[in-house]
Amino acid sequence: MSIVVDNIGELVTNNPADGDGLLGLRHDAALVIEDGRVAWIGPSAGAPAADQRIDASGSAVLPGFVDSHAHLMFAGDRAAEFGARMAGEPYTGGGIRTTVAATRAASDDELRANAKRLVDEALRQGTTTIEIKSGYGLNVDDEARSLRLARELTTETTFLGAHVVPAGSDPDAYVKLVCTEMLEACSPYAKWIDVFCDRGAFDGDQTRAILEAGARTGLLTRVHANQLVAGPGVQLAVELDAASADHCTHLSDADITALSGSNTVATLLPGAEFSTRSPYPDARRLIDSGVTVALATDCNPGSSYTSSMPFCIALAVRDMRMTPAEAVHAATAGSARALRRDDIGRLTVGARADLIVLDAPSHLHLAYRPGVPLISTVVHNGAPQ
Ligand SMILES: [Zn+2]
């Protein structure tokens, strides 16, 4: 089964060798999909025939968004906490424990249905790859259950037993549990290990111990770093060759230097700053220092309850001074790199056929027309949705 997408007004390839600028833009283009992969790219006038045709009618076609940071295994919501915060109360991260109680009390079917609802919601908004973390179980059984259910929805699963220390637990005893019995139960369902290294969560020594234990079982590393205060998270992420340091809101000069000379992506999560009314990370400084930047939603019921990558792109452009091209690149190629994937986040021959057709002539419209549902067609794994 082959599909030709033709009459593409603007094709974002993310391959500067194949088109103009950072996004590798091609105009009046077409592409052919075979067996779930991009098999051909060229001028629309020269497009070969295929079993099925999608007429883009002059619209823009982009790689599907890659949401490399999402917390979807939970129950309940925290709308009341959001309301209180917007009325002036500070965000401390303490509300995570509210979601832990709801998650533990939920059935498998309830957790599965809630996560599936969010994955579908994200897909409709153009997200074709999504990472899902545990972290609202915080005991051996509920963390393993969260990852087992997440695995039904994505291959990008992350063990975040070290989200916070659960109420009533001794921190040192909890770190030991995470590194031993919990890790053993969770690692079969996880690709990644992550730690919330921040004030009120885990310190540098605890973070290192957990990440090193995860690496010994074959898990790859990513870190929640420097969201609430400047701390050791970013430097640790670079030292341990983490794929990504996520948040990066409070960075020292040394943090930026470390990131710029590394393979660690800085994943920015502007939905969190929006939803906690906090200062945004300095994306310009990171980009101008040569750091690879990713954008993701941080979708979670406490500090960023959005599944919308277009919303995050709009925030990045308006409030973090990223150019529209930089923001689109960060939400596709950048976030693919944050998952150490080279088969997604780009539209080049051989790449996975994950793409979106906009109801607009260029990628600029994603930030120019915020809040408008501009995704007219999503193709996932070569299949129109
Ligand atoms: Zn997060």
Image (tube, rainbow, N blue to C red):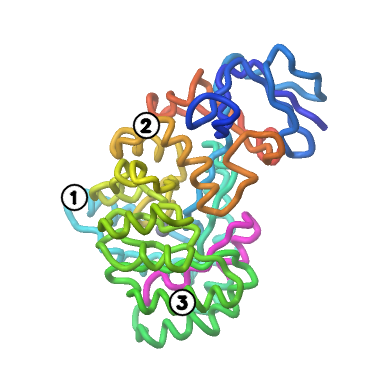
Of discs 3 and 1, which sits in the foreground? 3
The answer to whether the residue labelled 2 contacts the one labelled 1, judged by CB atoms less than 8 Å apart, is no
Residue under label 2, please give it: 323
Give residue 78's position: percent from left, percent from top.
Answer: 35, 56
Residue farthest toward the left in the current orientation of the protein = 88
Of residues 143 and 333, the one drawn nearer to the viewer in this rendering: 333
Q: Position of residue 127 (x, y in %)?
A: 55, 41
Residue 189, image x, y percentages: 63, 68
142 relative position to 248: left or right: right
Q: Is residue 144 left or right of residue 261?
A: right
Q: Is residue 297 magenta?
A: no
Q: State the extent of the magenta-drawn residues as a range.
A: 145-165
| Residue 135 seen in the figure | no
Q: Reading the chain from its start, which is encountered first: label 2 or label 3?
A: 3
Crowding at dot 2, Cα within 10 Å, few <14 / some 14-19 / many 20+, comes out as some
Can the viewer see residue 81?
yes
Q: Amino acid at mark 2?
A: Thr
Q: Is residue 84 above or below residue 187?
A: above
Query: For residue 238, which quarter of the picture?
Result: bottom left
Q: CA distance from mark 2 to mark 1?
A: 32 Å
Q: Which quarter of the frame holds ligand 1? A: bottom left
Q: Residue at x 50, y 52 (%)?
A: 338
- Residue at 78% x, 24% y is 52
- Residue underneath mark 3: 210
